[in-house]
Image: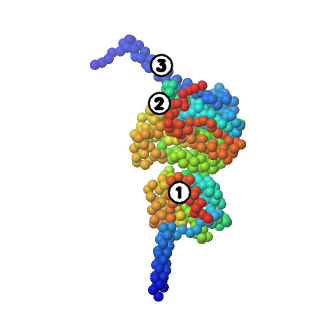
Amino acid sequence: MKFKGTKYSAIGLLSLSLLLSFFAGRSFLEMRNPKPIFAGPDVKEVKHLSDYAPVLAGTPEDPRVYVMEGEQKGGTVFILGGTHPNEPAGFLSAVTIVENATLERGRLIVIPRANPSGFTHTQPLEGSPQFFSVKTPKGTRSFRFGSRRTNPIHQWPDPNVYVNKEGQKLAGFEIRNLNRSYPGDKRGYLTEKLAYGIMELIRKEKPQISFDLHESSPEYPVTNAIVAHEKSMELATMAKLNLDLLDIDMKLESSPANLRGISHREWGERTTTNPILLETPNPSQGRLRGETTADLIVEGKDKYYLSAANKGLLFTDYTEKGLPLELRVAQHLQTVEEILSVFSSSNPEKAVSFKKIPDLSKLNEKGLGPFLTGIN
Amino acid sequence: MKKSKILNSAVLALTILGLVFAIGTADEEGESPSFEQPILITSIGQSPGAMMAKVLAKRVELEFVFEPTATAEQLEEMDVNTVVAVVGASGKGLGAAGLDIDDEISRVNELICKANELEIPLIVMHIEGAQRRGDMSNQLINKFVPESYYIIVQKSGNDDGLFTQLSDENDIPIKQVEKAAGAAPILDELID
């Protein structure tokens, strides 16, 4: 049977395609609206990174900076989440701190969404969902799942080869990877300007310790890991030994001196801070995963990872229980707390200590939801 | 006369018992030499395990020199009485030290030869658990653990029994600990 088109069928098909384009476009543009982060009780000021690096003002790469202060004076600590927006535990750990933590001593400077442009798109060919949700006592709260790199809408084209400021040769697309762009360049590409802005913040605020919160694939050797520059390695080691006693298995990794452009190397080389990068295992970014759903992001359950674990191919424990987001956030928060505790006990005049922070036991007992209720 | 016979028999029996007990104890404890301070803490494979040993040594107030890439020449210049080498391969650590696995094997070979020449005993530790077991680490474990006089291993790093097997085959005393921190009191007890 042959279908003969008429002007009415043409108008019908055109209308249908316009309707589909409308909904698809609306869904696509929705990714550019940042989900709110609510300032918690100890947030004394909300700034922008452009306050430290004016070159970022008015660009898509001007993240919010939350400054928290304790009752007593002490040191300063910097926490960076969301360097890679497809590593949700790093981002949500920073959000949980901003919205819940109270400080006894010192200052905490937190950027939960380090690469805002990376949160506005998903990585091509990955089949990632645009959003994932966490159930809270006040309802379901939705968060963006983004890309490892800056949105090409904001920075394009990529060169064939990216040679960063330190002379490291990388694949061209890495020019949009914040954690390959340090120490940055105020006259460089947008992502390099962002890296420069973060360096400026560290130079001006002089934090004693700086954290960069990440996740990695369960099949990647550097997972469940504290990566430390030489000058922060002893501190990281002391914290690691304490974490062992809490049954939190975080291994230590040295920051490679010959891989340049990464936070734990360049922050350590060019500022006075002690840099530490944390990695927890995230099945939603690994190569072995099946369908990438919002549930996979939150629950971390995947039959292919289970099969890989049974064959001994993973660098983390993995069971039918998966690797839930709350557990990965707890791992980040407990490690941060332990490192601050070790540092504060040996540097009392520069101490930074929490009065209240959702730690492993609280997150295990209550889950993540009660700490993401969005109380302003 | 009878009394002295009984006395002699009793002395003989006690001597035999003593000998049996002494031999039994020696077998149980192996033939480990005495370990004395100061110690050199070094790495076999450049993982951060050596730094963990440094922190543990500090906790129990041992006198030590920390040199993860110690060479035979450096050992000769040092005033140390025991070498504590922490085995565990890390690609990042080797890269940071500017070494590849062959360089590392050659450095440790020379270091152990020199330690033997200077009659400095070697303790090998593996305290980073199952996560620090892989082909490269196994290569180092198989090569250098048999050279040691004492093994301290975190249990999860010995799940496959490799350290126990090397201990049995080479008659080296071994102590297993649940957590890395458990190695501190063993070092404290072991080293005078």
Residue pointed to by mark 3: A22
Distance from disc 2 to disc 1, alpha carbons, whole Å, reads 42 Å
Q: Picture coordinates of residue A235 (x, y %)?
A: 63, 48
Residue in view at x 47 percent, y 30 percent: A129
Residue pictured at 53% horizontal, 64% vertical: B150
Helix, strand or loop at mark 3: helix
Marks 2, 1: nearer the viewer: 1
**In what quadrant of the picture does the N terminus of chain A appear?**
top left
Chain containing the residue with disc 2: A
Residue situated in front as seen by the camera: A181 or A45: A45
Q: Which residue occupies 53% across, 37% down? A: A362
**Residue holding disc 1:** B126
* Marks 2/3: CA–CA distance: 19 Å
Going from the N terminus, do you reach mark 2 or mark 3 first?
3
For label 1, the crowd category at 10 Å Cα-Cα, with few meaning under 14, some 14 to 19 and many 20 or more, is many
**Disc 3 crowd, CA 10 A, few/some/many (<14, 14-19, 20+):** few
